[in-house]
Image (spheres, rainbow, N blue to C red):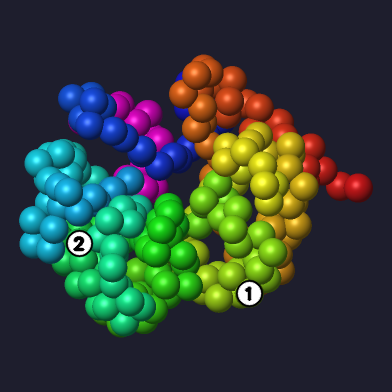
Amino acid sequence: MIKNLGFEKYAYDWRNEHLDDTFTELELAARNNIEIIGVWLWLNAKRDSLQHLSADNEHLLQIIKQLDLKTTFWVGFNGNFFEGLDQEQSVKKATDLVGFIAEKVTAMDCKIALYNHSGWFGNPLNQLEVIQKLPEFNIGIIYNFHHAHGAINDFNNVANSIVPYLKAVNLNGMEVDGKKILPIGHGKHEKEMIRTLQKSGFKGPWGILGHVASRDAKEVLEENLNGLKVLLAPE
């Protein structure tokens, strides 16, 4: 499907039930010359802690090692890591956690980028504070429109701040009070946000999502591709 749609690279998102097939999928991608530019890594305080990853996350790292895959881990943290903490405490805890992960993936000859999911860590301005405390790891940012509805009205400031660190942007239709997942071209703000990032110096890569579990992934990707083409067509 990926090849038929004309893609040469993608980021691998997963849940626990996918781990049994992860090795096979990533190996198949390599055999077909499809680059895995990112692998999602999600940490939850109920299962992960400083110096200790959950069994599933460790399993994922072992698969990447076994494949000798050189990629970037797209790292996000559940908000439960930062409950009850003030800004200074949150920055300290996040810096320690990110540093721990960065050391592990750097030892695998991989890179790390921070993923704006939700909660305190999902704010890219907080991520910048962490990145600036860990300059030795050259940490990037993965910016996701579908987790950025709260930033629409302040997007110029956000874009100018994060562009020097941006490694990828994942697109979505954007409405201030709309659905979280909306096809590209169905919102009022995504075109302006894309142009803002371009004017700030970001040239890609740009990602699209197949983030609708109730529909066939191919159909969702095609819908987003077509919406993007229409959105960016010359006026």
- Compared across the picture, whether 132 is left or right of 60 comes to right
Q: Is residue 203 above or below residue 22?
A: below
> Residue under circle 1?
157
For label 2, the SS is helix
User: Could you tell me residue 214's position as x and y percent?
Assistant: 50, 19
Looking at this view, is 119 or 112 the one in front? 119
User: Could you tell me residue 186's position as x and y percent?
Assistant: 74, 37
- The nearer-to-camera label among 2 and 1 is 1
Highlighted magenta segment, given as a residue range:
22-39
User: Could you tell me residue 212's position as x and y percent?
Assistant: 51, 27
Q: Is residue 99 above or below residue 3?
A: below
Looking at this view, is 178 or 181 the one in front? 178
Can residue 145 be seen at all in this image of the molecule?
yes
Which comes sooner in the sequence, label 2 or label 1?
2
Residue 24, magenta (yes or no): yes
Q: Which residue appears at 65% of the width and 34% of the height?
A: 183
